[in-house]
Amino acid sequence: MDDILNRAEELIGENRPEEAISLLRNVDLVEAYILRSEALRRLGKAEEALRELDAGLEKFPFSYVILATKAEVLESMGRLDEALDTIDQVLAILPYSSEHRFVKARLLFKLGRYEDANLELAEVLRVNPRNVDARIMKAFSYYNMGLKLDALSEVNRALAFKKDDPKLHALKGRIYFETGYQKLALSEYKIASHYEPENPDHYYDIALCYYTLKMMDDALLYVDMAIARGSKASYHALKASILNEMGKDPSQEIKTALQLDPSIKPTLENLLGVKISPEGNIDKMK
């Protein structure tokens, strides 16, 4: 039987899910239900994958492995409340599982329940203080709760274990920027761009720091680096603001920003102190 299960797993890995399902057709084991559900997911049949797992739970109602897999499928479908209920069933069987408690924290985080997520993350980190993913999520939870200094402390703890994580440096930069320490923010954003050089958001963040510091040549350089890697309305809006501060014509950047996201028009008008026509032309100064 192990040979059948191993072969089915190989077939799924080779992207031959139909063959795996056929091979497992008459196998009534926990592992078979999980493999069949994975094969169905590979075929884009998430609902059928759930039905397969529910059939497995009828046979093995206390299988935490099937329950955990079901929670994963529900999460991938965006059915977060159902996934949370399912992972709670797993924790009823394995109350001290740090792995599944982390999954619960992730679901709570996605649901915007940051305080509840933090409680779960505290328990995860009590068991495994070196869990960097938990520390990153805890930092973002604090940040989303408005507790920026707590978030900063958690970021620094996480950086002690993973100093090359661009998400941590970007979050640290954002905290510094929003608390008025633009030069410290600039340093963190540059570190983030070093570790993740193709992410345009880092260059936009650097440009925004320079813009805030009234260093327009540097701001223009970095916003162009952001635009070269990806086009977003916010990038072009910032470039329009920079050009306007430099006494140059921002019209083309305004039009591009509006084409990408028409809802950015009020933001542009406030940034530039102008009224903008529906066509993207500057009508008059406000």
Image (cartoon, helix red, strand yellow):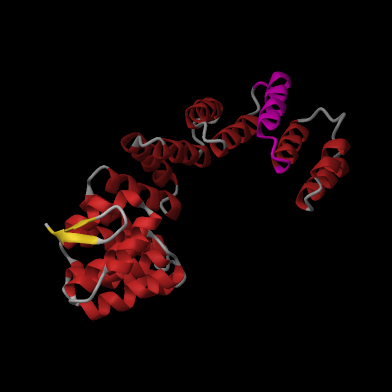
In this rendering, would 102 be left or right of 117?
right
Residue at 79% x, 43% y is: 17
Q: Quadrant of residue 183?
A: bottom left
Q: Look at the image and give the residue range highlighted in magenta.
A: 42-61
User: Where is the C terminus found, in terms of image quarters?
Assistant: bottom left
Q: Quadrant of residue 200?
A: bottom left
Residue at 80% x, 50% y is: 10
Whether residue 238 is in magenta: the answer is: no
Position in image of residue 281 (x %, y %): 27, 61
Residue at 52% x, 35% y is: 78
* Number of marks: 0
From this viewpoint, is residue 131 visible? Answer: no
Above/below status of 262 relative to 187? above
User: Where is the N terminus found, in terms of image quarters?
Assistant: top right
Residue at 39% x, 57% y is: 259
Q: Main secondary structure of the magenta part?
A: helix
In this rendering, would 4 be left or right of 162?
right
Whether residue 46 is in magenta: the answer is: yes
* Residue at the top extreme, as displayed: 58
In this rendering, would 99 be left or right of 182?
right
Position in image of residue 163 (x %, y %): 39, 67
* Residue at the left extreme, as displayed: 286
Above/below status of 172 relative to 129? below
Position in image of residue 181 (x %, y %): 17, 65
